[in-house]
Image (cartoon, helix red, strand yellow):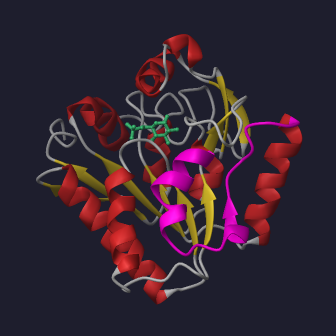
């Protein structure tokens, strides 16, 4: 695990966008794993700028998102389908046929199985972008007693529901279940780029870097991955 510490969240985002753009330029048909949450937003804004200025072309890129709430239609303003559309996809030239986000509806087993099959058919993920939850979750892999190997359905924890309620009218409106790539799915990516900014991530980052490798802190599994880069601002790195 390689750590880089930047002055602020903006510098983290600029560095992340630069790394992603370099990947796409060097491997135009790469498979990108994408994340939602507030952390990658400025990275996506910078990638849009790089696209508009002709630096990067997404036309041959394939994307796979980490996760989706269960029970929200794709058009719901808080669905991750909608988030990706609004914050990245509609602003760049990604081929709509090459965009993959697990479905928030339909038979749960079929959704999970199909997603893993699509990932395998695409040849796996070249570069996976990640944020981190305050409890150390990655994607929607919550603290658990094992590392889930593949895409699966989860019950969200109270901590995650509370953290994500800011996007909904009330805590009651936050879906209780989600579909997510497993920790195993994420570890199969050939490269991983985790971003974190802000003091509310400092405990999770400390546990990820210095704590025990345990499914109680899902992000700690990234220490087992041979090619993980972590970009932090000073606030998120404060406890290292
Ligand atoms: C959600 C997402 C995660 C994300 C986390 C942190 O739970 N499923 O992928 O990393 O939120 O979000 P934020 O970046 O808004 O702190």
Residue at 49%, 46% in the rendered image: 36
Task: Residue 29 in the image: state x and y as whole percent.
Answer: 60, 83
Question: Foreground residue, 21 or 189?
Answer: 21
Decide whether residue 99 is among the magenta residues.
yes
Q: Is residue 118 left or right of residue 110?
A: left
Query: From this viewpoint, is residue 4 visible?
Result: no
Q: Which residues are magenta?
A: 81-107
Is residue 43 rendered magenta in the image? no
Ligand 1 is found in which quarter of the picture?
Answer: top left
Count of marks placed on residues: 0
Residue 17, image x, y percentages: 34, 68
Query: Percent position (x, y) of residue 183?
Result: 60, 45
In the shown orientation, is residue 208 left or right of residue 141? Answer: left
Closest to the observer, 166 or 224: 166
Dividing the picture into quadrants, the one containing residue 77 is top right
Percent from the top left, x then y, of residue 237?
A: 19, 43
Residue drawn at x 79%, y 36% as measured from the top left: 105
């Amino acid at each position: 695990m390689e750590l880089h510490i930047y002055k602020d969240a903006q510098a983290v985002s600029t560095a992340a966008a630069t790394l992603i753009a370099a990947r796409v330029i060097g491997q135009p048909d790469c498979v990108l794993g994408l994340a939602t949450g507030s952390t990658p937003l400025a990275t996506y804004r910078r990638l849009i700028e790089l696209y508009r200025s002709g630096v990067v072309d997404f036309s041959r890129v394939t994307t796979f998102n980490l996760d989706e709430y269960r029970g929200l239609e794709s058009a719901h303003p808080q669905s991750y389908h909608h988030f990706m559309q609004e914050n990245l996809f509609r602003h760049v030239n990604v081929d709509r046929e090459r965009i993959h986000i697990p479905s928030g509806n339909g038979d749960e087993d079929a959704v999970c199985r199909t997603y893993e099959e699509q990932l395998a058919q695409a040849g796996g993920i070249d570069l996976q972008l990640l944020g981190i939850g305050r409890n150390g979750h990655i994607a929607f892999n919550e603290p658990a007693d094992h590392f889930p190997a593949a895409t699966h359905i989860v019950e969200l924890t109270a901590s995650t529901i509370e953290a994500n309620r800011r996007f909904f009218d009330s805590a009651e409106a936050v879906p209780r279940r989600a579909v997510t790539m497993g920790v195993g799915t994420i570890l199969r990516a050939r490269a991983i780029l985790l971003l974190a900014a802000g003091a509310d991530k400092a405990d999770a980052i400390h546990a990820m870097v210095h704590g025990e490798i345990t499914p109680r802190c899902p992000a700690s599994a990234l220490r087992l991955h041979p090619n993980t880069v972590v970009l932090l601002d000073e606030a998120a790195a404060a406890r290292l």
